[in-house]
Image (cartoon, grey):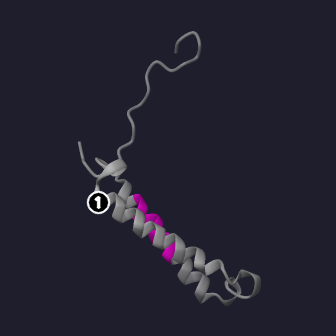
């Protein structure tokens, strides 16, 4: 390390497939929606909106996955492997 405590060598960045991370998150939202609708105490009374979190999250996840698969604009190069 240098005298000002800044690192002189950084490890290489971790290479991940962002589209797979988005799919995993989408699957977790779908799972949450199914559990919230299957367990009555999770969607009764003041919690009636809880299952919709899973529905909206899954919908946004699908839109994001489609955007990444399109591969233009800010998503260009996300799926390319070096």
Question: Does residue 11 appear to the left or right of 35 in the view shown?
Answer: left
Q: Residue at x 41, y 31 (%)?
A: 11
Image coords of residue 24 (percent x, y): 43, 65
Residue lying farthest to the front in this orientation: 73
Q: Residue at x 51, y 77 (%)?
A: 31
Q: Nearer the viewer, residue 54 or 41?
A: 54
Q: Quadrant of residue 67?
A: bottom left
Q: Nearer the viewer, residue 19 or 5?
A: 19
Q: How many callouts does the rendering have?
A: 1
Give x and y (percent) for residue 2: 53, 12
Instruction: Give the residue number, with chain letter if any, for mark 1.
Output: 70
Furthest-right residue in view?
46
Residue 4 location, quadrant: top right
Residue closest to the far top: 3
In magenta, the rendered stretch is 21-30
In this rendering, position of residue 25 left or right of residue 72: right
Vertical position of residue 54 compared to residue 48: above or below: above
Q: Is residue 78 magenta?
A: no
Q: Closest to the observer: 4 or 55?
A: 55
Q: Is residue 27 magenta?
A: yes
Image x and y of residue 5, in percent = 58, 17
Q: Give the vertical position of 64 relative to 77 (above or below).
A: below
């Amino acid at each position: 390390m240098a005298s000002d405590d800044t690192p002189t060598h950084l490890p290489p960045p971790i290479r991940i497939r962002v589209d797979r991370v988005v799919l995993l998150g989408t699957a977790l939202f779908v799972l949450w929606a199914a559990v919230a609708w299957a367990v009555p105490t999770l969607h009764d009374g003041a919690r009636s909106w809880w299952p919709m979190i899973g529905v909206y999250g899954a919908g946004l996840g699908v839109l994001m996955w489609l955007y990444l698969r399109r591969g233009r604009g800010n998503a260009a190069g996300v799926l390319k492997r070096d």
